[in-house]
Image: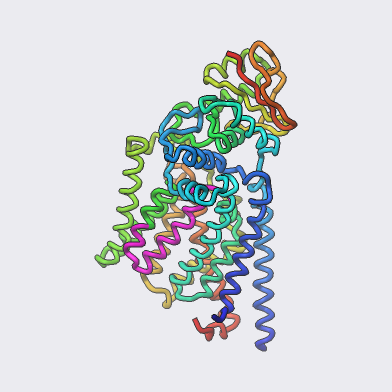
Amino acid sequence: MKIKDRQILLFAIICAALWYRSPILEGYIIPTFGNTMYHVGIIRKTIETMYYPLYELSYGGGFRHFYVPAYRLLIASLAITSGIDPMPLSGIMTIAIAVFIVLALYSLAYRIYDNHYVGLCAALFFVLSPELTIFTSRALPQLLGLFMVPLTLYFVIREQRLLSVLAAMVTALTHQMTLLVLALTLLAYSILQIKDRDKFLLAFVPFLAACATYGAWQLYTMQTLDILSISQVKYHEGTIVDLKLLARAGLVVIPFSIIGFIRTFLSAHVPRDCKLLMLSWFVVTLLLTKNELFGVSIFMDRFFTFWVECMVIFAGFCLFDFLRYLDKSLDKVKM
Amino acid sequence: MKKSWKNVLIVAILFVLVIAGMVQVKKQVDPWLTPVITEGELEATTWIKENTSLEDRFVADIFGGELVMGMTTRIPIVGGDWANAPNAAQNMLDAQTIYTTMSSKEAYDLCKEHNCTYVFAPLQRQIHAGYGWKDVEVTKFSNPNYFELAYENQDVRIYRVIY
């Protein structure tokens, strides 16, 4: 098998991603910011009792669980299978899932622009984004969510109906904020495709599947569909994304993504479906990031991470376009 | 422009981009990867696992509480997910008061109010119970009428609440 230059470049980008994350395993404990050890606690309880706990250990315990189980069950099953304690295993899996996110972004960018080198450029911007690195270096359900969103969108754009429904259902059980990002993106895309029944259903069915899955889970755990009385909503947990926080997307990422966004929609080579999907993802995550403008003020900084994830794909296209402009010979590379 | 110069330019542009990006990433990411928890606190969880029961409840801050939860599945009054917690904000306030008050009686009464059997008191770091970083006032826990030292190492003391 001949190893192609793009595979070597992708490997180098993955190595850079691994290097950033090496401190996760160097310490006596995994990084603790972001309630990471809380998730380890639920995973440990699941392993010890062989049941996913219905009642919380948090804040004095004794009340019903709100969290969705996919991330915890993934780590718990791997801990049982491997015999590794869930705390260090959470660190190991953080690194593994981060690598899968690089691959998911590479694949999605490749499919959107039909060009491997755009995928490589997007993967490069992933490792140059502090925001994405911060949220993919800690053992959190959002980490898995950041993998599930591009993966589900990849299945949608490839018209893999069954896989997109399954991925949307898994996302619904991975992380509530991720679910909101994905569900609204799918809904926006299906509305934009409303004139084409097949394409409308391609996104609308996974949207329904995700909503139904989450609704069923919440009814099972909390015995209510009411989500507005949770503390995060009541106390408006979240930080406004100002210019300082925006810079965390990556000082290199931002200018490239702005130009990449414009170039994408001006380009005659990018298929209409891909443009609409990227537009849906971009607008939905932007609106969620600035939700304080609509008086919501919840988790703006967490939705921002998904916006940045979308931005790196545009930035990847811009960088490729720029390099192609400098050297037309890149056009001749066999893709 | 000759092709060799073009290649040099492309490589140079990529090099500058990558270095600039990586410097920013390292600078902004490293603080998020700090453990907060000290090695002695982690070591103390072995004692907790072996010497306390699943019904025991701990006074702890967010980081200590999640450590205790993560390593032992014991229940802290602060830490974890507050989405569905009935009195999360009050728990945060009371945990902070227990750590910061000078009064042994006030700390003891709050421990009893929350049915806490142990206090997890870090010695080498500040605590964060939800309202910012605060120093731990540890001398009040030495009052034998209310608390009894159950475990200590260089980083943490664990006090049993006397009922």
Q: Is residue B152 magenta?
A: no
The answer to whether residue A177 shows anywhere in this view is no
Q: Is residue B41 above or below residue A143?
A: above
Q: Is residue A27 left or right of residue A290?
A: right
The answer to whether residue A157 shows anywhere in this view is yes
Residue furthest bottom in the image: B2
Could you tell me residue A119's position as x and y percent?
A: 51, 70
Q: Is residue A3 above or below residue B129?
A: below
Q: Say which residue appears at 39% left-offset and 53% top-offset.
A: A170
Q: Say which residue appears at 53% left-offset and 45% top-offset.
A: A240
Could you tell me residue A61's position as x and y percent?
A: 47, 29
Q: Is residue B153 left or right of residue A230?
A: right
Q: Say which residue appears at 44% left-offset and 52% top-offset.
A: A287
Could you tell me residue A78's position as x and y percent?
A: 50, 51
Residue B74, quarter of the rendered image: top right
Which sits in the foreground, A290 or B103? B103
Could you tell me residue A212's position as x and y percent?
A: 30, 48
- Prevailing SS of the magenta stretch: helix
Q: Is residue A229 above or below residue A195?
A: above
Q: Is residue B91 above or below residue A249?
A: above
Which sits in the foreground, B124 or A330? B124
Residue B96, quarter of the rendered image: top right
Say how the picture is coloured: rainbow
Which sits in the foreground, A94 or A129? A94
Q: Is residue A145 magenta?
A: yes
Residues in magenta? A138-166
Quadrant of the snapshot with the N terminus of chain A:
bottom right
